[in-house]
Amino acid sequence: MRKPAGAIAKASNSEAASRSMRTNLPDFSARGRARVVAVTVVGTVGCVAAALFVDSFTFLAEDAAARDHAILVDVLLPIALAAPLLAFLMSKLRELAIAHYDLSIIASTDSLTAVLNKGAFRMLVDAYLSKVAEQNDPCQGALLVVDVDHFKTINDRFGHEQGDTALQLVARSIQSALRGADIVGRIGGEEFGVFLVASSAVEAGSVAERIRGAIRGAEFRPRGNRNEPLSVSVGGASFHSAVTFDELFHLADQRLYDAKRRGRNRVAMAAIEPKAA
């Protein structure tokens, strides 16, 4: 299985690319170098200003040479002492922030496929649904459950290492079919969850078909040149009123088994009806 560092690298690279596309401004976050530079400069200037202010009360009593010498000391001494100390402290704080971020990636990412793990996926979906329910605003969306067809056969025929490769290929194919705000996680051995934010039932069905088609069209070559097509069954539940994760998952899971019973490599969708007032 892929080490967590791979997941960290993918997440970090993805975030960096996204941030670069959004803006060219310096990164002043806790993990940004710009913050280290800014705090070092501002802090040093502040130390210089403080030293000049304290000594300013004695400037009038000194001759020009002594005053110039005092000013020079008040400027150079903080620069020599405060700047390196602040730079060192801020660099250490930045390293801690990066380490904390990397740990959060490990805690929330499936190490094999580099998508969210089950706990993180459910936490994000639950948070979104709770926020929508609290605001009492019109809402819509969908949950898809994507299951790899005949995955045990893949492991038995080609070995578990190639089974892992197949799961990685499925995860990438799902991600390629999604919109920017959508969420994907690995919620079981060969099962993935996809949450479609603000998606209508028709849009959800289209995305589900796009996922199915992307995986069917992906090239899986466990034995060299011969392609072994993969397929998935997709069960989906759409909503347009306040709903819980468990309600969505229960209906999506039912539709998934419908898709399996109807021959696999297909999509089955249903909508949750609004609760009576």
Image: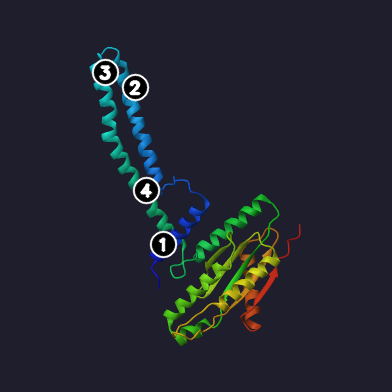
Compute the Cα span from label 2 to label 4.
31 Å
Callout 3–callout 2 Cβ contact below 8 Å = no
x 28%, y 39%: residue: 84
Residue receiving disc 3: 67
Give whichever of discs 2 and 4 has the lower sequence position: 2
Residue type highlighted by circle 1: Ala
| Mark-to-mark CA distance, 3 and 1 | 55 Å
Residue 220 location, x and y as percent?
Answer: 49, 80
Q: Earlier in the sequence, mark 3 or mark 4?
A: 3
Q: Which mark is residue 94?
A: 4
Q: Upstream in the sequence, badge 2 or badge 1?
A: 1
Q: CA distance from mark 4 to mark 1?
A: 18 Å
Q: Quadrant of residue 260?
A: bottom right
Residue nearer the viewer, 2 or 52 = 52
Dot 3 or dot 2, earlier in sequence: 2
The amino acid on which the numbered mark 4 sits, given as a three-letter code, is Arg
Q: How is the image coloured?
A: rainbow
Amino acid type shown at disc 2: Phe
Residue to which mark 2 is pinned:
53
Find disc 1 in the rendering and name its residue: 9
